[in-house]
Structure formats: structure tokens, C-alpha cells
Amino acid sequence: MTKLFMFEKPLGMRDTFPDLYEIKDQTKKNMEQTMKLWGYKFIETPSLEYYETVGEASAILDQQLFKLLDQQGHTLVLRPDMTAPIARIAASKLLKDEAPLRLAYSNSVFRAQQREGGRPAEFEQVGIECIGDDSVSADAEVIALMVSVLKEAGLEHFKISIGHIGFVQELFTQIVGTEERADTLRRYLYEKNYVGYRKHVNELALSSIDKERLFRFLQLRGSENILLEAHSLLEGDRGLRALEQLKELWSILYDYDVAQYVKFDLSLVSHMSYYSGILFEVYGENVGFAIGNGGRYNKLLEKFGKNSGATGFGLRLDYVLEAMQIELSSTLQQCVLFSDERRKEAIGLAHELRSEGTEVVLQNWKGVGDVDEFTKGFSNVHFVVGQDPKGGETS
């Protein structure tokens, strides 16, 4: 092992120390329990998938995939997301009886980074997939569940932005005429480059009325009242189906009593090419980017030969914790410090305390260099030694 790499990690990889691990673990358990209460069953997929199936279907940029070859020469990838692998399983094995599936996951995903920049190449996603239900009710359930999961995790302040990719596609195609030109506009939106969007629109060979429609489109944010404004931007009846779905969605979310957490943002788009309808992002305080996202992805199932509805969400656990602004502190434990001649007694005491649910460290005092330094981090220390290491007798 060279000294250069002895203490280094691969680009974008992170160590998780005990204090943070404990918080992550408890937060994740709270989130998972909420999903189970809503009837979602947990599933695991392999860390390695074939590039030609899950790798290409995932919609993650090719340069972000970790690739390697197996012994037969097949190109493999470390899973870049969880939705594509679950879609593979659902299409091949689980959708035989055509009944809706409610699946959940909590796993690491891997996306290569070109430079460090503080962005992790491995991170944990916690989420669900509702597969086999093409109704707006399923979209609403997914969003309402995400609200419940975030609240149970301990996050109090967050907002969910909801859009519809069908509305964006129809409006842009009506105005600019071709899919290629529409893609250019969508790229500006995905990058949140509204200055570039406005500049590009001004340079297009369009009427002033059409340019104004594209500018007004950026203002379509708020509650259900903006749907009437969105309707006025369309020509004819095409695109109305998307607005009708959003109106129905709002009504259902109101019944779930989560409308206060959501708002419409009809300029919302995604780099995930398989989204086919309602989509959304969730933002927390003190985090300048989405802590989770989701939406309807019927097109992904089609890639695996299955014509079925599907929707879901994924939350990045590290971003959720960042939004919660948790202060790290060591978990208070007790310690039983013993000498050789009273070892059996010390083991019995530790067992008794652990049976009561107390975290206990059992430590032979001969293995400790500085007793005062070692014991100061514990809430309580039980000395079970023939002679107090500080100089006196103890029982």
C-alpha cells in the first residue's frame, strides 16, 4: 500500500462516524416504519446490474455510471438509482396478476463524480414505488405518504413543488413546433437557468404573443387557482388532460390534509426521461436543492416490456438530515469497569443493565491507559474492581 493512498478514499466516497451513524440509523427506521404502516413491502436489489438493461433504463447520465466487466465480458454498473431495478423486477416477476404493487426500499446508490466539490458518489435513498395503478389517486397517495415519512423523520418545515411533464411538453410543442426546440427550453428549466431561458425565448423567431406565453409560463406557481391561468396559455383542448389531473390531485391531497405542504410549479421538469405525467420535488429549509423527488414513470415499465402505470418517490437520507440540522452528540452509555478477579460479577451486572435496555460498555480496567479520560464520556461508571484504579478499595 502506497503512503499516498493509505488514508485516502475514492472520489466522492464518505466515511460515517458513530455519532452520525446512530442518527442516520434511527431516522431511517422511523421512515421505514411509516412506509410499512401504509402497506409498502421492502425489497432489495443487487448492487450490480447489467449496463444494457438497468444502466441504460435508469436515465442517469452515462458519465455518472460506475462500470466494470464481469468474467464473461459483460458490462456491469453499480446501481445508479433504485427505480429502474425495481421496475425490472416488477415487470419480470411481480406483475403477473396485474394487481397494484406497493414496494419500498432503503439502499445505497452510486453516481460517479468528475471532481470532488463536496458531492457524494455513494448515498442512501429511501423511497417507495406504487406500480400497476394508473390513477391520480396513486399519485396523491405517494405524495401524502412522503409528507408523512418526512414528518416522522423529524423534519418540520418543507415544501413540495408539483408539476406535470405532459403540460410542459404540449405547451412548448404548440409554441416552438418541434421536439428538439422544446428540449432546449426544458434544459434551461431543469438547470433553473431562468435568465438563459428568457434570453433564448427573446432570440426565437416567434410572435410577441407566443413569447409572452412562454414568459407567463414561468409564473405558473401557487395553489389550484393557477390552473386557470395555465389553461389560458394552451390552444385548443390538447394539454387539458394534464391540468384536469392536477386539479383532481389537489382535491385528493386536500382530503389527506397535506395541501399546506404542496404548491404547483408548472415549470417543473426533470432530467429523468422516463417521467410521463405528474412529477414533484421536495425542498427543506437550509438546503439549496431538492432533498427528494418523484413522479409518474409509465415509460420506464415499457422499456421492460410491460404496459403498466407506476409512480413513486425517493428521498436522499443525507439531504434530509441536513435539512433537519441535527447537532451531533455522543450517545450516553454506561460503563462497567472491572478487574480480573471480579470479571464474572461484572459480566452479570452488564447483562442485567442490558436486559433493561441500557447501552453498556464492559471494559477490563487493565486495558485502559488513562481511566479519567476513558470514563468521562459515560453517563454512569460502575467500578467492579478489587482495588479502585484511582487508589482506594471499591465493592
Image (cartoon, rainbow, N blue to C red):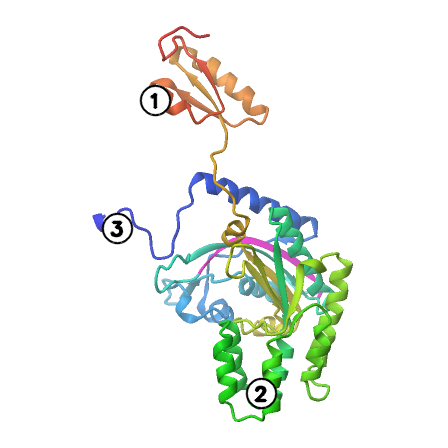
Task: Point out residue 385 in the picture as x, y percentages from the top left corner.
Answer: 41, 11
Give the spatial CA distance, label 1 vs label 3.
Answer: 31 Å
Q: Type of residue at label 1?
A: Val
Q: Is residue 43 positioned above or below 221 on the image? A: above
Q: Is residue 305 positioned above or below 213 on the image? A: above
In primary-sequence order, the first of circles 1 and 3 is 3
Give yes or no for contact between labels 1 and 3 (Cβ–Cβ under 8 Å): no
Q: Residue at x 26, y 50 (%)?
A: 5
Residue 393 falls within the magenta-colored stretch: no
Task: Point out residue 362 in the picture as x, y percentages from the top left corner.
Answer: 44, 22
Local crowd at mark 2 within 10 Å, few (<14), some, or many (≥20)? some
Q: Do we see residue 180 in this rendering?
A: no
Q: Quadrant of residue 268?
A: bottom right
- Number of numbered markers: 3
Q: Which mark is residue 394?
A: none
Q: Secondary structure at mark 1?
A: loop
According to the image, label 2 marks what residue?
211
Q: Is residue 93 positioned above or below 381 on the image? A: below
Q: Which mark is residue 5?
A: 3
Task: Point out residue 19 in the picture as x, y percentages from the top left corner.
Answer: 46, 39
According to the image, label 1 marks what residue?
368
Main secondary structure along the magenta-highlighted residues: strand
Task: Point out residue 247 in the picture as x, y percentages from the top left corner.
Answer: 74, 71
Give the spatial CA distance, label 3 vs label 2.
Answer: 55 Å
Q: Quadrant of residue 266?
A: bottom right
Give the spatial CA distance, label 2 vs label 1.
Answer: 75 Å
Looking at the rendering, the stretch of residues picked out in magenta corresponds to 98-110
